[in-house]
Image: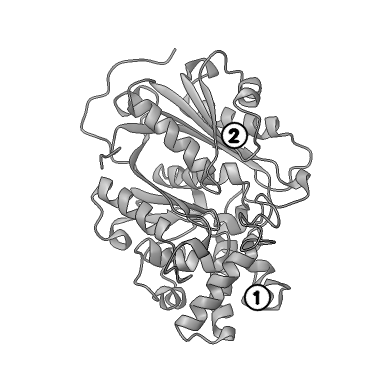
Amino acid sequence: MGTIKDKVAIIGMGCSKFGERWESSTEDLMIEAAYEAYEDAGISPGDIDAAWVGTLRSGEGGGPVADALKLRNIPITRVENWCATGHEALRNAVFGVASGMYDVALAIGYEKLKDTGSGGLGVGRGQSPVMGARATAPSYFSFIANRYFHNYGIPEDEGKELLAQIAVKNHHNGTMSPKAHFQKEITIEQVLKAPIIAWPLGLFDCCPTTDGAACAIVCRADLARNFRQDPVYIKGIGFSVDSMLPMNRPGFDYLGFEANQVAARQAYEQVGIRDPRKELDLAVVHDCFTITEMVIYEDLGFTHRGGGPEEVRAGTFTLEGELPVNTDGGLKSFGHPVGASGLRTTYEIYTQLQGRAGPRQVKDASLGLCHTLGGPPQVACVTILGNESPTKVDAGRKRR
């Protein structure tokens, strides 16, 4: 496998306010995110050579983006890949630039879920009318929590308190994120007393249904400093898709996801990372449920298999810990407008690497990881960003 390392840079990013945006259309959300990105990069719509848009809204193609963002007569492609849809838009834009076909490309993801009256992935979405009938996201991930507690001999009360600590951590970080859906501290007692959604997952173990959009502008790495002095470079991208239904994956133990592990391994190899816990400065991961974040710690090599509980107790992944995880509050605080989430996680790493994260800033951050996990679930993307510049001298195209 080849490497994408230092071939492409992010020169601008934008993110809408996430939340119950009843007053805003999908176009409003796209404009909010994209025009922040334009301003951040110091460019105009006419500088964009091609665009990729991530959304679950089928049948729309690239037309709504062209209309909303005033993009004229350029290639615009809609992509979708479950919860990794936003990262899929970014990945394709990065590859489009790395191929040499385009100098500057835009990736945008959006979703307007509150107006639909249902969650982003729907209800009863199982792919098999027998084996997957009436399956929901909370029910799939409740299997993981129950299996994890059973396998490692964790009493249910103790297990629920461990998960509560993750929820409390992420809500705390969300109070320092002005664009987050939820910006309120919660207590372990509140988490434990909340209504059960799918045992043992309660209301505060689940991310909310949310509207939002996020956008990235990427260019050739050797052009990046023509646009700004502090670009952020793509260091590695890993992506893995496996058979969807758990019952079609022989040996699946509900203790982790091979797609996470494979995507991480691909990205680490591109960057040359051998010990992610020591070499990364922070990570933003797909905490659709609190149990998901705990198994992600293990899947991405931040700790050993079964080591999640001891790390939660030790505060390893808090903002003050050894490896801060979900510094912006994660999906738990932002929610999960599916097409936007991968780009929203990228936005947080980008902001941190530029030292612009305010009270949640990780000191001296230079290498960060963002991650998404989708399907029921076996679709994963791991993207690693860094602020260390490649050795090549910037040259070539200037801003129009």
Q: Secondary structure at mark 1?
A: loop
- Name the amino acid, label 1: Trp
Residue indicated by mark 1:
199
- The one nearer the camera, 213 or 244, is 244
Image quadrant where one finds the C terminus: top left
**Category of crowding for the residue at label 2, using alpha-carbon neighbours closer than 10 angstroms: few (below 14), some (14–19), many (at least 20):** many
Indicate the quadrant where residue 229 lies: top left
- Give the Cα separation between the discs numbered 1 and 2: 36 Å
108 shown above or below 382 = above
Indicate the quadrant where residue 299 lies: bottom left
Image quadrant where one finds the N terminus: top left
- Name the amino acid, label 2: Ala
Q: Residue at x 43, y 37 (%)?
A: 91
x and y percentages locating residue 260 in the rendered image: 41, 57
Residue 29 vs residue 14: left or right?
Answer: right
**Category of crowding for the residue at label 1, using alpha-carbon neighbours closer than 10 angstroms: few (below 14), some (14–19), many (at least 20):** some
x and y percentages locating residue 362 in the rendered image: 41, 55
Mark 1 or mark 2, earlier in chain: 2
Residue 29 in sight in this render: yes
x and y percentages locating residue 74 in the rendered image: 51, 16
* Image mark for residue 33: 2
> Dots 1 and 2: beta carbons under 8 Å?
no
Q: Secondary structure at mark 2?
A: helix
Residue 123 vs residue 323: left or right?
Answer: right
Indicate the quadrant where residue 26 lies: top right
Q: Residue at x 69, y 30 (%)?
A: 27
Q: Residue at x 66, y 54 (%)?
A: 125
